[in-house]
Amino acid sequence: MSDNQFGDVTLGTTGEHSLSTTAERSAVVQAPGVTPGQDWVIVTRGLKREYDMGGEIVRALQGVDLAIRRNEYVAIMGPSGSGKSTLMNLIGCLDTPTAGEYWLNGMLVSKMSDDELARVRNKEIGFVFQTFNLLPRATALHNVELPLVYAGVSSDERKRRAKHALAQVQLDHRMDHRPNELSGGQRQRVAIARALVNDPSILLADEPTGNLDSQTSEEIMRVFEGLATSGQTVIMVTHEPDIAAHARRVIVLRDGLVASDDRRSAFKQSMGIS
Amino acid sequence: MPFHEAVRLAFQQIRIQKLKSFFTLLGVMIGVMFLIAVVSIVEGMSRYVEEDFAGALLGVNTFTLRRGTDVRFGNVSEAEWRELQRRPRIYRSDVEQVRAALPSGVTSSIENMTFAYATSAFGRAKQVQAVGAEESYFALKKYKLTSGRPFSSQEVTLGSKVIVIGTEVASHFFAGLDPIGRELRIGGAPYTVVGLIESQGSVFGFSLDRLAIAPYTSPISRVTNPRGDVRSFVVQASNAALLNDAMEEARSVMRGRRHLPPSQPDDFALETSASAMSFFQDLKGKLIAFGTALPAIGLLVGAIVIMNIMLVAVAERTREIGIRKALGARRRDIMRQFLVESASLSVLGAALGIILGVGMAKLIAALSPLPAGVALWSIPAAVALGAGVGIVAGLYPASRASRLDPIAALRQE
């Protein structure tokens, strides 16, 4: 994942270089129906999601325009009810929008069938959840292997790649342990290894530190930082400003719409984080 | 997910919940157990009848000329019964004509048989199978004598009061004694025992050694055929082709003597072991049908139990299903996982049922006169049945699992 297949994207150690500019983003968003360029990993145009709650229509997303370039490290923030969970489900291909376009890696995901979505989740998205969501009866190694099982990878190759992914998060010495024999931070690192094992286009983390103490949270944030530095696209959904401040770009949602979309420095300033 | 992966996962799941899995497959296990036991016993009976019963009682390449068929199964209609009653009896004059027409190389004997009480100075009265026959009867039946001699043709001509007895008759009436030369009374007439037949064993717990054979011309005819006719005339050929020739000769002689036009059916019966077997085939079909109906209900109950447990499993593992879906499992992957799991449970139940069923059949065979023979086809059939039951029972729970919404499933605690 460290090899740069896209020559026009500059990888930098500080990360600020790979950020897309506001002008670039609005150009790609304001072109409905057009397949975005190769370096845009996520583009949404007027994304809407409505729920029918017993006759009452709840508008969770009311037209979200987003453009995220490959190798960006983005946090999506917002208070509860702002629609960030809905947006994360849509980005994660767990849900389909009521209206609007969602392009993932040049594919129009918003029009896909159930099975196609499953395939996209398998190949393109690595999930990291607040509650880890590891299979309790399976070892760390087997948990990491799971996405490869559904990708149809042979058993030997699966083991090799799962061990490599666990080594990336410094957990290769714990691979034969079950989740209940691991600490919270270790569990989340197993989940990160599982997310990375199939070499996804995006790492999608939903409140990854929500169940961890502050010290372990820092440890997980360092893992994310390392991944982002090595060129992995990371999208993190959180409601904690100081966790969001680890990302290089912060998108704030309010009432189902994008309220602000800034570089980290501007976000820190507005939140008063040093 | 590849199939072998699903099987591995299913067995892992079964291993984790050993007790629960065991109770789940209990229904299928019991159903298959009784199914195998019933099929084994019916199969064993039919093999026994075909191999031993037919040979021992009716003989191979043998036909019997009678007034009506000996063995009847099912309902005889009024008209059939009347027809049987109207048939003329067979007399010695008929037998002589038939015998004269038989090709050379066949053995034949009159066989007048009935159950009658016998007495002796040493034992209480007891029913024996009294037979009036000719001297050729011993060769025809392949009876070997352990002591004494069979009666001779002269004794048949004279109607001598001599008798050859089976081992059970000997042990009852002459316990601890040498029966040869002693007196056995049947129907009031005294007979001198001249020979003892080797033990013939039993069929369905019915002893073949309770017989007493005297010349058909002796006073035994008052017991076996009080009307003076011939009950049956047995003909044995050395091979099937000769048997057919002999049967056709016998038929034409009999039809000629009765002046039957070609349009009229025989008013006598020519019975072979094969024709007697057809009645048993009929019986076997009914036994299988009734004997499998009950275990089939067991299997149905087993299927319902599996379906229930699988529904519980889907509810319990909603979160796991959500995780698998999030990681890229398609509907058919989840469907397959749960189908394979229910089929594995059911096949495991069937396998245990086969082992217990075979054991049960052997136990019944050992403790009762019923024979048992495990039909090899019943084993793959039971496994296939188990898999079928599992798949059918798993269909609804698996389809429910595959349709779960991943977001809702992941949110479940």
Image (cartoon, coloured by chain):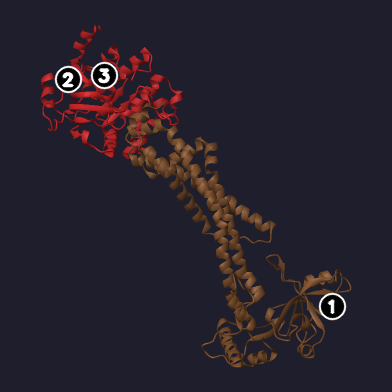
Disc 1 residue type (three-letter): Arg
Give me the disc on residue A4: none
Q: Is residue A166 left or right of residue B372?
A: left
Tell me if I can see residue B305 in this picture: yes
Q: Which chain is brown?
A: B
In terms of secondary structure, where does tag 2 sit? loop
Dot 2 falls on which chain? A
Q: Quadrant of residue B224?
A: bottom right
Pick out the residue farthest to the right: B121
Q: Is residue A137 left or right of residue B232?
A: left
Q: Which residue is mark 1?
A: B185
Task: State whether residue A13 is above or below residue B231.
Answer: above
Give the colour chain A carries in the figure: red
Dot 1 falls on which chain? B
Q: Is residue A16 left or right of residue B381?
A: left
Residue B43's x, y, as percent? Answer: 58, 62
Residue A71 vs residue B167, the one in the foreground? B167
Q: Identify the residue at horizontal 57%, vertical 48% (top origin).
A: B30
Q: Identify the residue at horizontal 59%, vertical 57% (top origin).
A: B38
